[in-house]
Image: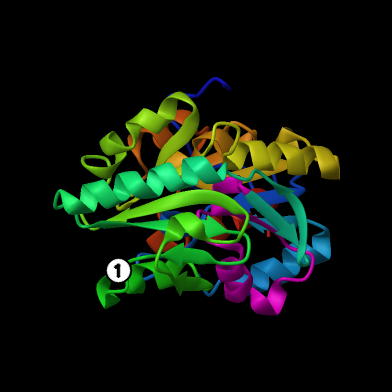
Amino acid sequence: MPATPTPLTDAEHLPAGAADIRLVVTDMDGTLLDDAKRLPEALWPLLAELRRRGVLFSPASGRQYATLARQFADVAEGMVFIAENGTYVVRDGVELSSDPLERTVAADVARTVRRLVADGVDAGAVVCGKRSAYVERADEAFLAEVRTYYAEHRVVDDVTAVEDEVIKVAVFDFGPAERSTAPALAGFAATHQVVVSGEHWVDVMNSTANKGTALRRLQRALGITPAQTMVFGDYLNDLEMLDAADWSFAMAGAHPQVLARARHLAPSNNEEGVPRTIARVLGL
């Protein structure tokens, strides 16, 4: 882990045009998107300029690949999508890397969630495959949350019996996930990743799967160094990818562990912190 300056360097105080950046990677929720889940208007002209300069822009999210591709449909050509918290990486419809989850583990997680629900926890499992996401809950309140992150999803009778290559299991908890769902899934942490990826979400993945692993694979494939990489994040599922970039930014208001891990501080997601910081560091 790189040494963390104390205090964090404010992005607004960095010298303009200070870095030779070749790759920009950003989390979505709480980072690039504002609290209303909108992409910043300043992003679109910035993406055109990054493309002109040969700088690759890569969303890295717990969101599904289909969801990310739809959000960036007009500019997706050549863009690398680090989806499902790094378990599925795709460029122009071609898989670059993936880290599938054992079907038996996915089934065990789903059964654990069923027991939680039976005990009164208002939660539901989303079994994430490469083709689609699968859920058993069909109530509108739950499906509304699922739609935000999983454009391709299906309601099925039994998520333990889906015919797809599973890459993770996400659990949505209407309450604080760190207090109820995460402790219930802690038994899987001895052999797998159990990460709180948002206030209401917990993801279970292979122990080798995270955004940082996916980013390092991408850097090696493209011949891009950490010194040429800029990363933005706000929550616990962003920690490992912050370590893969010399230009690592925590958003204002980020989780305390993210603030402790990043080298620099960016304005908040509601202040268009990501495009503002990119423009500052690249001297645009």
Find disc 1 in the rendering and name its residue: 142
Q: In the image, is residue 176 above or below residue 242?
A: below
Q: In the image, is residue 231 above or below residue 144?
A: above
* Residue range of the region highlighted in magenta in the rendering: 61-87
Between 105 and 226, the one nearer to me in the picture: 105
Between 271 and 255, the one nearer to me in the picture: 255
Pick the quarter of the image with the C terminus: bottom right
Is 91 colored magenta in this rendering?
no
Instruction: Tell me which corner region of the image, top left, top right, bottom left or bottom right, holds residue 75.
Output: bottom right
Q: In the image, is residue 239 above or below residue 128?
A: above
Identify the residue at horizontal 44%, vertical 24% (top origin). Answer: 190
Identify the residue at horizontal 63%, vertical 55% (top origin). Answer: 165
Residue 52 position in % (x across, y down): 82, 66
Pick the quarter of the image with the N terminus: top right
The amino acid marked with disc number 1 is Phe
Instruction: Tell me which corner region of the image, top left, top right, bottom left or bottom right, holds residue 275.
Output: bottom right
Identify the residue at horizontal 32%, vertical 44% (top origin). Answer: 112
Q: Is residue 60 visible?
A: no
